[in-house]
Image (cartoon, grey):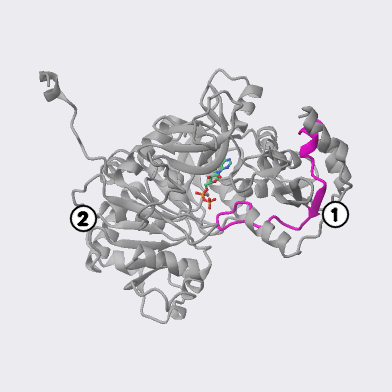
């Protein structure tokens, strides 16, 4: 050891409390704005901080101690934002419950998390009431709003009364940065959902990482947080917005295009974030009437692949830059943000932003083949994405080992298949379970559906693999056609010619009213597969063009 060892930096704990205090002191005048359908209610950060102190004091009075889980069953709003900070900073664990889970899954996650208190919106009481007899750990239910709570069949506390009963000031305890701050469950497409526990440290470094990766939010911005607070840690935006002093605009339950646009037109956000389905809906609404989205500079879109046609449409019609991002509940969640290089021309910028994302500084990422060997970053080699880093989970709550999801050397197996280029831009081609394996070759369902959605008459398209006698599996394209438009399989096949390899072009097409969605608004291919297996999808088959398929063997791509 040399003497220089003694002059190192402070090992200062990376807790959310430090960031909370920063937001209060530095950005006390910034605002939290919650939409009520026809008007907004507002509190400054200074007032919000005061309410957070009262919430922490009230929960302490209810017996909540360090390490205890407190569930939230809420839309995005003022009180949910208060819970996001107050619960972790008092040393307890914020458990964001997905309001769209099936009742048995909801009961499962509440019990698995051991929630002692649940904060619920009055509008969501009927949903929570479905599990009221199956959640023995829950000692108190705190209702936001003054709506009827009798369906819960027990005495409830009211959020406003609770915080009004407390005085000013709360002494935030000193915390360990490795303490649990919050937990979210994966949406459990197979089996029960699994709990991902975020630490103070992971949230702290993720906040900085998101900013460095390109989420350009600051004082003067108005950040519209459409991504639900119960989905993947609200993409870290509640923490980022507070620390950077951006006004935070919370849409409550008004997520349909019409009320969402009313909120945008009145409160004029400058930036936003949500899954593609939301922006697709707004775009469609814009075909019925003129929308004023002129306040918005950029929108982060992720959670599933973002079709280039969507990015182009926002650019052309509204001058809004869509930036694609990739992440998972397990990755806090940002792992990659498709920020274009600053010298990119508008056309190049569009190309960059259409990719899945550039690996965020702080995240180690690799792609591996079936044998686990690492593949080069050449933009062509395709393998499973694995990652690790200070905001990537090492396991699931209560699960001791999970070799399917974690490698022996500690990397998260994401279940996504991608290539990475020499600039660190990744391109997801599919989820492992959605890849279509046809005659020994792979078709990317994501690429195929993105191309189909580029057709002007197509609103949504999801492609699944279905059994085929000759080729093992072939793509079935499930297509939603725009109102009033008519389109045939032959026309769509012709449209795809030249856009994808001939042997990718589906012979099976199903025209459906809507692509089923998961609890967080993504295409649910699992549901489509189930419908197909149950014979519920009407499939029109064009003649299998053996020549086109056969050309693949001759190297036609
Ligand atoms: P769920 O698996 O239930 O959807 P998550 O919200 O954690 O839960 O989803 C993470 C997954 O979402 C990723 O593994 C990936 O498959 C998909 N995903 C996220 N962002 C993108 C993107 N930009 N492009 C393609 N897929 C994405």
Q: How many marks?
A: 2
Q: Is residue 155 above or below residue 447?
A: below
Element at label 1: strand
User: Residue 255 in the image: x percent, y percent?
Assistant: 58, 55
Give the residue at x 79% y 37%: 503
How far apart marks 1 and 2 lie (CA) works out to: 66 Å
| Residue identifier under label 2 | 169
Q: Do we see residue 547 in this rendering?
A: yes
Q: Is residue 129 above or below residue 294?
A: below
477 relative position to 242: left or right = right
Instruction: Say which quadrant the N terminus sits in.
Output: top left
Q: Which residues are magenta?
A: 497-523
265 relative position to 514: left or right = left
Instruction: Say which quadrant the C terminus sits in.
Output: top right
On residue 383, the disc is: none
Q: Is residue 97 above or below residue 127?
A: above
Q: Nearer the viewer, residue 193 or 356?
A: 193
> Of callouts 1 and 2, which one flags the residue occurring earlier in the amino acid sequence?
2
8 relative position to 406: left or right = left
| Residue identifier under label 1 | 540
Q: Main secondary structure of the magenta part?
A: loop
Q: Nearer the viewer, residue 546 or 174?
A: 546
User: Residue 99 in the image: x percent, y percent?
Assistant: 50, 63
Quarter for ligand 1?
A: top right
User: Residue 407 in the image: x percent, y percent?
Assistant: 42, 42
Q: Nearer the viewer, residue 528 or 443?
A: 443
User: Residue 392 in the image: x percent, y percent?
Assistant: 40, 42
The answer to whether residue 199 is magenta is: no
Circle 2 packing at 10 Å, graded few (<14), some (14-19), many (20+), is: some
């Amino acid at each position: 050891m040399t003497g220089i060892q003694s002059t190192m930096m402070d090992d200062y704990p990376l807790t959310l409390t430090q960031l909370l205090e920063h937001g209060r002191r530095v950005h006390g005048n910034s605002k939290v704005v919650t939409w009520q359908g026809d008007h907004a209610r507002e509190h400054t950060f200074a007032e919000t901080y005061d309410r957070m102190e009262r919430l922490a004091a009230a929960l302490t009075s209810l017996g909540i101690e360090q390490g205890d889980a407190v569930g939230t069953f809420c839309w995005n709003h003022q009180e949910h934002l208060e819970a996001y900070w107050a619960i972790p900073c008092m040393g307890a664990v914020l458990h964001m419950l997905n309001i769209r889970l099936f009742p048995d899954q909801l009961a499962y996650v509440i019990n698995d998390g051991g929630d002692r208190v649940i904060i619920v919106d009055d509008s969501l009481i009927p949903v929570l009431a479905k599990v009221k007899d199956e959640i023995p750990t829950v000692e108190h239910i705190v209702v936001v709003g003054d709506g009827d709570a009798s369906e819960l069949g027990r005495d409830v506390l009211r959020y406003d009364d609770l915080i009004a009963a407390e005085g000013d000031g709360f002494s935030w305890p000193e915390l360990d940065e490795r303490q649990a701050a919050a937990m979210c469950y994966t949406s459990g497409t197979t089996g029960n959902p699994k709990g991902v526990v975020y630490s103070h440290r992971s949230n702290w470094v993720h906040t900085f990482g998101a900013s460095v990766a390109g989420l350009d939010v600051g004082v003067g911005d108005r950040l519209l947080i459409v991504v639900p607070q119960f989905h993947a840690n609200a993409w870290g935006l509640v923490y980022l917005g507070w620390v950077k002093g951006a006004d935070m605009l919370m849409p409550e339950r008004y997520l349909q295009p019409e009320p969402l646009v009313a909120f945008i037109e009145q409160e004029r956000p400058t930036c936003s974030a949500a899954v593609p389905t939301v922006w697709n809906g707004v775009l469609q609404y814009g075909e019925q009437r003129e929308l004023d989205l002129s306040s918005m500079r950029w929108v982060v879109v992720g959670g599933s692949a973002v079709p280039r046609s969507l990015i182009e449409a926002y650019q052309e019609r509204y001058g809004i830059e869509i930036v694609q991002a990739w992440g998972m509940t397990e990755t806090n969640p940002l792992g990659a943000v498709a920020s274009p290089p600053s010298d990119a021309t508008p056309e190049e910028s569009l190309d960059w932003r259409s990719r899945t994302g550039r690996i965020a500084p702080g995240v180690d990422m690799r792609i591996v083949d079936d044998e686990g060997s690492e593949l080069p970053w050449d933009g062509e080699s395709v393998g499973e994405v694995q990652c690790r880093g200070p905001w990537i989970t090492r396991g699931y709550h209560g699960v001791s080992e999970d070799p399917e999801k974690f490698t022996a050397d500690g990397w998260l197996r994401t279940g996504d298949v991608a290539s990475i280029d020499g600039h660190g831009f990744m391109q997801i081609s599919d989820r492992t379970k959605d890849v279509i394996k046809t005659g020994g070759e792979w078709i990317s369902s994501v690429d195929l559906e993105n191309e189909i959605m580029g057709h002007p008459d197509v609103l949504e398209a999801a492609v699944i693999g279905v059994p085929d006698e000759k080729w093992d599996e072939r793509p079935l394209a499930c297509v939603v056609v725009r109102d009033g438009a008519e389109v045939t399989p032959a026309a769509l096949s012709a449209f795809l010619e030249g856009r994808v390899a001939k042997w990718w072009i589906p012979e099976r097409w199903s025209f459906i009213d809507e692509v089923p969605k998961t609890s967080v608004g993504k295409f649910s291919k699992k549901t489509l597969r189930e419908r197909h297996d149950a014979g519920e999808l009407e499939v029109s088959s064009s003649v299998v063009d053996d020549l086109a398929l056969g050309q693949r063997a001759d190297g036609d791509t």
